[in-house]
Amino acid sequence: MTFKAELLIFDLDGTLADTKDDIATSVNLTLKELGLPEEAPGVIYTYIGSGVRRLIQQAVGEAEGERFREAMRIFRGHYMTHLLDTTKLYPGIDGVLDHFRSKKMAVVTNKPQAYADPIAAGLKIRNRFDLILGGDNGLPLKPDPKMLLTVLEKLSADPKRTVMIGDGLHDIHASRAAGIAVCAVGYGLGDPDELRRAGPDFFCETVDDLMRVVV
């Protein structure tokens, strides 16, 4: 089964780019500076995807308060320093973006614009996209559909010819609410079995599968 798309909307972390180690490093540098125990990278990976506030809430164990605010400030500094240390495109993504160069393409990420833009520039993919929308633009984060609806409006795209490609449950739920198709990917940070159970329209085990599913 294939999907004929005019617009492809990609998630960033765990879909286009493997960002997890730089995020984990920055979280642990933050915890160390606060005098808190560092966490195993694999644990921190499970915190990724719901935005920076949720990431730090889970890492610090506090949702508000002075220590939480200090942790947010410290993390921002460390991540701006380390966001391109090891971050890279998943193998094959460059070819996928080239394959779809004649279509409209966008990125919708819960990661703040202040991080998404330099990552896209550093990975040399910024000019591949008609729009990159980060999670600090006054819109609610995924799974709320408003970010996706904003992209549809800005790019004058037909929802029936739009597909969201992502590795998280937030991507599936946001797409459903926005009335667009969704393709979950199993190579990123999300649990493939959990993603399948959520019932995406399409599921791709590998990066190359994207070129067979979307036409």
Image: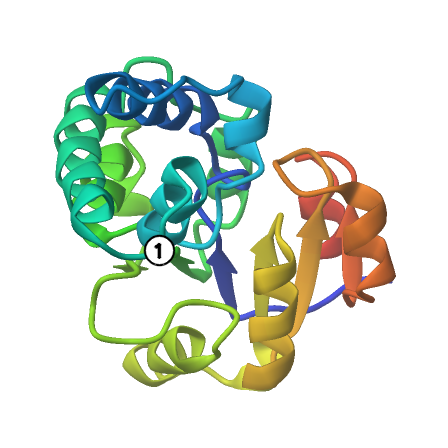
- Amino acid bearing label 1: Ala
Residue occupying the point 48% across, 79% down: 145
**What is the x, y in percent for residue 67?**
21, 42
- Colour theme: rainbow
Residue occupying the point 78% across, 38% down: 205
In the displayed structure image, the side of residue 104 where residue 112 appears, left or right: left
**What is the x, y in percent for residue 100?**
51, 50
Q: Which residue is mark 1?
A: 63
Residue 215 visible to the viewer: no
Under circle 1, the secondary element is loop
Q: How many marks?
A: 1
In the displayed structure image, the side of residue 169 where residue 120 appears, left or right: left
Q: Nearer the viewer, residue 140 or 159?
A: 140
Residue occupying the point 22% across, 29% down: 79
On-image quarter of the C terminus: bottom right
Residue occupying the point 34% across, 85% down: 153
On-image quarter of the N terminus: bottom right
Q: Residues within 10 Å of mark 1 (few under 14, many from 20)?
A: some
Which quarter of the picture shows residue 146? bottom left
Which quarter of the picture shows residue 204? top right
Height in image: 180 above or below 4?
Answer: below
**What is the x, y in percent for residue 25?**
35, 18
**What is the x, y in percent for residue 171?**
58, 62
Q: Nearer the viewer, residue 77 or 6?
A: 77
Q: Nearer the viewer, residue 65 or 187?
A: 65
Residue 185 visible to the viewer: yes
Height in image: 184 above or below 6?
Answer: above
